[in-house]
């Protein structure tokens, strides 16, 4: 029976040494224990609201100059502050000034670019017709200048001085190919 007691005592000693909480390394500092204050917790509830929807901006891919776009209605152009034209001054469903021509059927049909404007290929007032032909190889001669197709429904009209032999662009107009206003050509 003595032998059983010795074995049980040895097993208990081994079990106690395996569960020891003292660090094994003698170089590590021994933490000192100090009483800690109980932590206070607070639960705050707030109503959850959905954030306001983000404004969706629609990209206008119509061809144009700045905010003016071919096909834009007169109402759109007026709302954007781009023209003072009204249908009251219109002739046969068309209204025009020196900047735009607009029809009830097609919207803006012609935009006259300002003198300081340049096309995407660098043509501006003062460029030569040779510059136009170089930048737009498929351009064709017409009346007092050259016309260059941009896409299936738009073109540039590079106009020179009417009745002059001058070889310089004096006006650039961006026009729709489908128009219902004769003023779109002016």
Image (cartoon, grey):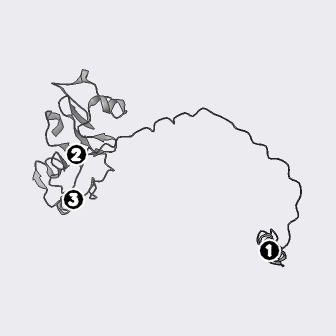
Q: Is residue 102 left or right of residue 117?
A: left
Q: Earlier in the sequence, mark 1 or mark 3?
A: 1
Where residue 48 appears, as percent x and y from the top left, is 57, 34
Rendered view: 181 above or below 149: above
Q: Residues within 10 Å of mark 2 (few under 14, many from 20)?
A: many
Of badges 3 and 2, nearer the viewer stands 2
Depth order, front residue of 149/89: 149
Identify the image quadrant of the C terminus: top left
Can you identify the residue that label 1 sits on?
4
Circle number at residue 174: 2
Q: Residue furthest top?
A: 88
Where residue 24 appears, as percent x and y from the top left, is 79, 76
Q: Quadrant of residue 21?
A: bottom right
Q: How far separated are the C-alphas under marks 3 and 2?
A: 18 Å
Q: Is residue 79 left or right of residue 109?
A: right
Rendered view: 58 above or below 147: above
Circle number at residue 95: none
Can you identify the residue that label 3 sits on?
128
Q: How far separated are the C-alphas under marks 1 and 3?
A: 116 Å
Q: Quadrant of residue 93?
A: top left
Depth order, front residue of 25/79: 25
């Amino acid at each position: 029976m003595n032998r059983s007691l010795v074995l049980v005592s040895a097993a208990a000693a081994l079990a106690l040494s395996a569960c020891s909480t003292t660090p094994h390394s003698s170089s590590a500092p021994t933490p000192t224990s100090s009483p800690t204050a109980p932590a206070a917790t607070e639960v705050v509830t707030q109503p959850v609201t959905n954030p306001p929807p983000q404004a969706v901006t629609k990209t206008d891919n119509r061809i144009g100059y700045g905010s003016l776009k071919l096909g834009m209605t007169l109402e759109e152009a007026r709302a954007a502050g781009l023209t003072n034209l009204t249908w009251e001054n219109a002739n046969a469903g068309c209204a025009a000034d020196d900047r735009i021509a607009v029809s009830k059927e097609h919207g803006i049909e012609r935009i006259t670019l300002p003198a300081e404007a340049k096309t995407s290929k660098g043509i501006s007032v003062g460029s030569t017709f040779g510059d136009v032909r170089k930048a737009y190889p498929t351009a064709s001669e017409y009346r007092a200048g050259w016309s260059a197709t941009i896409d299936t429904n738009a073109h540039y009209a590079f106009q020179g001085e009417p009745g002059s032999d001058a070889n310089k662009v004096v006006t650039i107009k961006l026009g729709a190919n489908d128009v219902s206003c004769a003023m779109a050509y002016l």
